[in-house]
Amino acid sequence: DIQMTQSPSSLSASVGDRVTITCQASQGITNYLNWYQQKPGKAPKLLIYGASNLETGVPSRFSGSGSGTDFTFTISGLQPEDIATYYCQQYDNLPPTFGGGTKVEIK
Amino acid sequence: QVTLKESGPVLVKPTETLTLTCTVSGFSLSNVKMGVSWIRQPPGKALEWLAHIFANDGKSYNTSLKSRLTISKDTSKSQVVLTMTKMDPVDTATYYCARIKNYFDPSGYYYYFDYWGQGTLVTVSS
């Protein structure tokens, strides 16, 4: 199975800050990577698919990039409603696998 | 409007078999570009993919849980069923079903979970 390593596991930032989360695959996955946001007590929500495609209705302050083994998820201007845990997920090989999550908090 | 809703027991005993049902609406389980996955999340931990099923009855399972899992669907009832045998307290988790979008287009190949159920917490305890 492909292992997905996210970093950091948690971060604290101020409103308006640029926040960056990285996700590293244990082997090359082309651009077959998705990002999800999960707020406490809620189901995950799709934000980015295919490494860089913004899901319909998702604010443009969210973006993704990368290919191969290294990927980046960015919030360009953190908002209070962005407090959540973010997960990457690869689909290059079955089974699909998730990263360990990054918890984003407000400083 | 796409919705998915999980149902099943909230409490199971160790060694018992868990049966969960996902009832979907707003899309058809016969759509070749879509499937349904089960994903779970132990309290305070990360997401873990369990299984998926597609319109052609294609199935795939989590590598380490494969021997305990069975996924099936009833297209006429718009339901996907997951069974997990030999339940253990470590299987205590919120279990989600999610719709899969799975397709090729000129820009590439895509497989993602675009709609999720609310989840159902299953506790394994005697």
Image (cartoon, coloured by chain):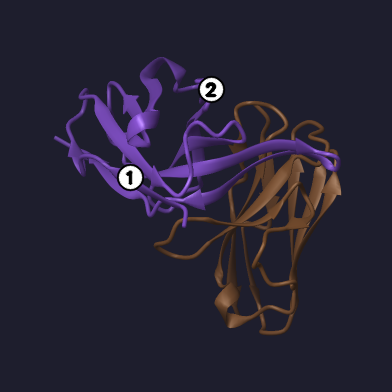
Image location of residue A76, percent across then percent down: 77, 74
Q: Amino acid at mark 1?
A: Glu
Which chain is depicted purple? B
Tag 1 secondary structure? strand
In the picture of the structure, the residue carrying the numbered disc 1 is B6
Task: Determine the CA span between mark 1 and mark 2.
Answer: 20 Å
Q: Is residue B122 left or right of residue B13?
A: right
- Chain in brown, by letter, is A
Res. B50 visible in picture: yes
Residue B19 against residue A53 in the figure, above or below: above
Q: Residue at x 20, y 24 (%)?
A: B16
Percent coordinates x, y for residue B113 in the rendering: 57, 46
Q: Quadrant of the C terminus of chain B?
A: top left
- Viewer-proximal residue among B112 and A70: B112
Question: Do tag 1 and tag 2 residues touch (Cβ < 8 Å)?
Answer: no
Residue neighbourhood size for the residue with mark 2, other residues' Cα within 10 Å, grouped as few (<14), some (14–19), many (≥20): some
Secondary structure at numbered mark 2: strand
Q: Which mark is first along the chain, 2 or 1?
A: 1
Confirm whether circles 1 and 2 share one chain.
yes
Point out residue A34 in the picture as x, y percentages from the top left corner: 68, 48
In the image: residue B14, left or right of residue B60: left
